[in-house]
């Protein structure tokens, strides 16, 4: 089937999980970009959905994203072992790549291609590039949330097990090869930062566009700038099943918080995020530590917190939770890795400290509320001017314009009127 005259162009998108609920950085980025693209295009998303997840499909549909669900059961050890073995036989990575290769998704993509030829094939995350061969003739946009090989390499360095460290280092090398194939096979590549874009350009990518992570500033505009009074709350937020987040939470609770409490005795640590591993859950037994798991609404916690802490030693991309704190007027203390790619300036928008200096930075900021308010005000301006999703969505739509013969200077309104 071809597109009817005056019908907006069609984006057929593929991602490895539904971008709902909005409880991880990856889901936030995918959701907001697809919803923004929906202002100039029709967006149809093929994604695996857990059995019984009809409500996810409905929620996304209500927000303008048409979902073609591929209902799947839980992963099993046997099936994942087969995937890992097949990846090894191909010389490809299993982590963040072949792990997400599903026959049922391939069948659904083929059916959508047969039903209506899309104008753009939009692949979200590196693993979705597995499906590029199903439509090699269609212009392809690839959104890379991270330099995945660097992510695996950094995670490997944190492993105490020699076997796991060696395995992840091998996976990092294989991911680097897959990244080269992917960026060379896409017509447009989205990168979250200038640093990431440079990596992809060096790998031979065409048409790299910096489309940063963002934040819905309007959602947090009623929160105060800076925090004052009451027992101070240090907030840590992240998906707790993700190794770098769990490691950072443990270090924050076991090493950093006791040092902070020696100077600010009533300071408390609140760890938010779904799927906490037992080791993270056990942190709640420590003095002053609370582990909530997933929460239905972040705003009350952002209102009660005095500082967002991001003592990350590995990971990649840019931290949506830091941007969320910026938009919410909450002071931030981060390691250099935790805030890389944001363009935020140490001492102007936040405090940047290595882990050995992290406790001093937090205690100092808790004892200087005026400084915290100044940092939060500057960070809030930065979020509004550079990272609001509405402006980022304009950039994403414009970046896709050349794939359908529309000049990239056109906004979403111009785009819709030109096709």
Image: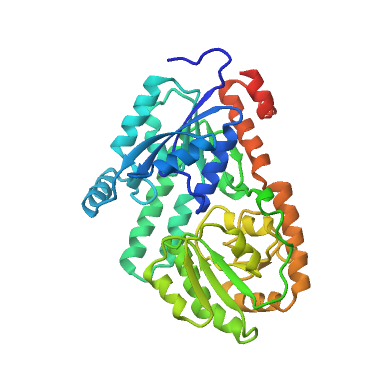
Seen as rendered, the residue at the extreme left is 78
The answer to whether residue 162 is visible is: yes
Seen as rendered, the residue at the extreme top is 5
Above or below, 324 relative to 59:
below
Residue 321 location (% of width, % of height)? 58, 57
Q: Nearer the viewer, residue 214 or 315?
A: 214
> Total number of numbered labels?
0
Q: Nearer the viewer, residue 218 or 151?
A: 218
- Which residue is pictured at 40% across the width and 26% down the height? 135
Q: Quadrant of the C terminus?
A: top right
Above or below, 46 relative to 99:
above
Above or below, 24 relative to 365:
above
- Which residue is pictured at 37% across the width and 42% down the height? 49
Q: Nearer the viewer, residue 134 or 309?
A: 309
Q: Is residue 321 left or right of residue 241?
A: right
- Which residue is pictured at 57% across the width and 62% down the height? 337
């Amino acid at each position: 089937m071809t597109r009817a005259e005056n019908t907006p162009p069609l984006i057929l998108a593929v991602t490895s999980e539904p971008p709902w609920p909005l409880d991880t950085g990856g889901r936030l980025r995918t959701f907001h970009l697809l919803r923004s693209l929906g202002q100039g295009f029709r967006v149809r998303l093929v994604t695996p959905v857990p059995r019984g997840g009809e409500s996810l499909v409905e929620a996304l549909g209500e927000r303008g994203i048409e979902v073609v669900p591929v209902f799947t059961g839980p992963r099993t050890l046997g099936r994942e072992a087969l995937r890992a073995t097949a990846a090894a036989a191909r010389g490809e990575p299993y982590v963040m790549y072949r792990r997400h290769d599903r026959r049922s998704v391939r069948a659904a993509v083929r059916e959508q291609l047969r039903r209506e030829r899309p104008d753009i094939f939009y692949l979200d995350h590196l693993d979705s590039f597995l499906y590029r061969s199903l439509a090699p003739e269609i212009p392809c946009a690839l959104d890379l949330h991270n330099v995945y090989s660097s992510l695996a390499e950094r995670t490997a360095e944190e492993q105490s097990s020699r076997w796991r460290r060696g395995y992840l280092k091998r996976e990092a090398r294989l991911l680097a090869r897959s990244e080269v194939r992917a960026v060379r096979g896409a017509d447009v590549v989205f990168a979250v930062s200038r640093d990431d874009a440079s990596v992809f350009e060096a790998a031979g990518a065409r048409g790299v566009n910096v489309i940063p992570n963002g934040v819905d500033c309007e959602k947090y505009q009623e929160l105060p700038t800076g925090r004052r009074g009451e027992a101070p709350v240090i907030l840590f937020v992240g998906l707790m099943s993700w190794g770098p987040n769990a490691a950072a939470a443990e270090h924050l609770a076991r090493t950093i918080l006791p040092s902070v409490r020696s100077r600010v005795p009533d300071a408390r640590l609140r760890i938010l995020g779904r799927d906490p591993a037992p080791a993270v859950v056990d942190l709640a037994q420590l003095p002053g530590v609370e582990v909530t798991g997933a929460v239905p609404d972040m705003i009350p916690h952002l209102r009660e917190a005095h500082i967002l802490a991001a003592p990350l030693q590995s990971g990649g991309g840019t931290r949506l939770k830091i941007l969320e704190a910026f938009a919410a007027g909450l002071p931030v203390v981060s390691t250099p890795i935790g805030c890389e790619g944001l363009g935020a300036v140490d001492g102007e928008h936040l405090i940047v400290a290595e882990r050995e200096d992290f406790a001093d930075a937090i205690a100092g900021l808790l004892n200087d509320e005026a400084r915290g308010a100044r940092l939060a005000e500057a960070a809030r301006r930065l979020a509004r001017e550079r990272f609001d999703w509405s402006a980022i969505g304009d950039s994403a739509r414009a970046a896709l314009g050349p794939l359908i013969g529309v000049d990239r200077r056109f906004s979403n309104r111009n785009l819709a009127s030109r096709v």
